[in-house]
Amino acid sequence: MVDLLAVCAHPDDLEVCAGGIFLKAKQEGLKTGQIILTDGAASGRAHAQARREEAAEGGKRLGLDYLVHLDFPDAALEFNQQAVQALIPHLRKAAPRLIVTLHPADYHPDHVAAAKITEAAAFSAGLPKYATDESEWHYDAILYMSADPRTNPLRPQLLFDISDVIDEKLHACAAHVSQKVTDFAKDYSRTLGQMAGVSYAEGLYLGQVLVLDKVSGLLRI
């Protein structure tokens, strides 16, 4: 159903960490989506419904084709069978080729849990005998994003120049009125841009070897 799917802990994670990447994916004709694991109610002063509405607007500004909320409690996300089993049918329905989730070494406990939940659910979703209404599904790769590369000791292996979509990214971030993340997102993108030698960038981390079938895939076009 989608080519690129984000599995995030909180409603604003995608816009801040990889909004530019998802905007560029849409420019390239890819279908994109997001699954948000928690209700986001513990962050800022907004209640869960307000954060859901902000996520809907942010997703609209990113051009997402698919958006699902699982509504686990914010700031209390746990890696357990309940969370894994809740995610599996949505992964099978979305059937992404690529998954992007939070880095397992990130600063927020919910982000660490999100990474583990995503990895376990993606594995189980490929098992034919794991019964859901959707059939088994296999992904090409899981990639990781960091909410703050300044505190993550690991440098991203992939950097994307998002200078041409930075205004659109910040517009999507601004949808999360209760969180006031726009200035942080701009600073975050500028920091990664300095690593890449461009104005603004976003980074992804590899979870496994990335297999290419074209040498041109290494070229910056």
Image (cartoon, rainbow, N blue to C red):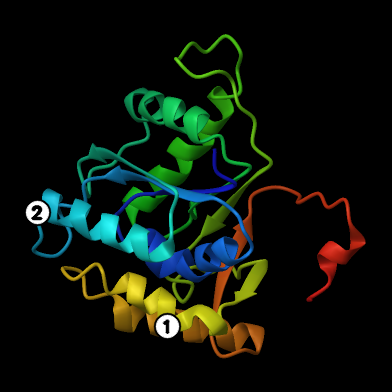
The residue tagged with tag 2: helix, strand or loop? loop
Of 32 and 18, nearer the camera is 32
The percent position of residue 180, horizontal first and vertical second, equals 22, 75
* Residue annotated with mark 1: 167
The residue tagged with tag 1: helix, strand or loop? helix
Q: Is residue 219 visible?
A: yes
Residue at 8% from the left image edge and 63% from the top image edge: 45
| Residue type at the position of mark 1 | Asp
The percent position of residue 124, horizontal first and vertical second, equals 54, 23
Image quadrant occupied by the C terminus:
bottom right
- Tell me: residue 102, above or below residue 171: above
Q: Mark 1 against mark 2, which lies toward the viewer?
A: 1
The percent position of residue 214, horizontal first and vertical second, equals 89, 56
- Tell me: residue 195, above or below residue 137: below
Of 1 and 146, nearer the camera is 1
- Residue 47's tag is 2
- 1 or 2: tag closer to the N-terminus: 2
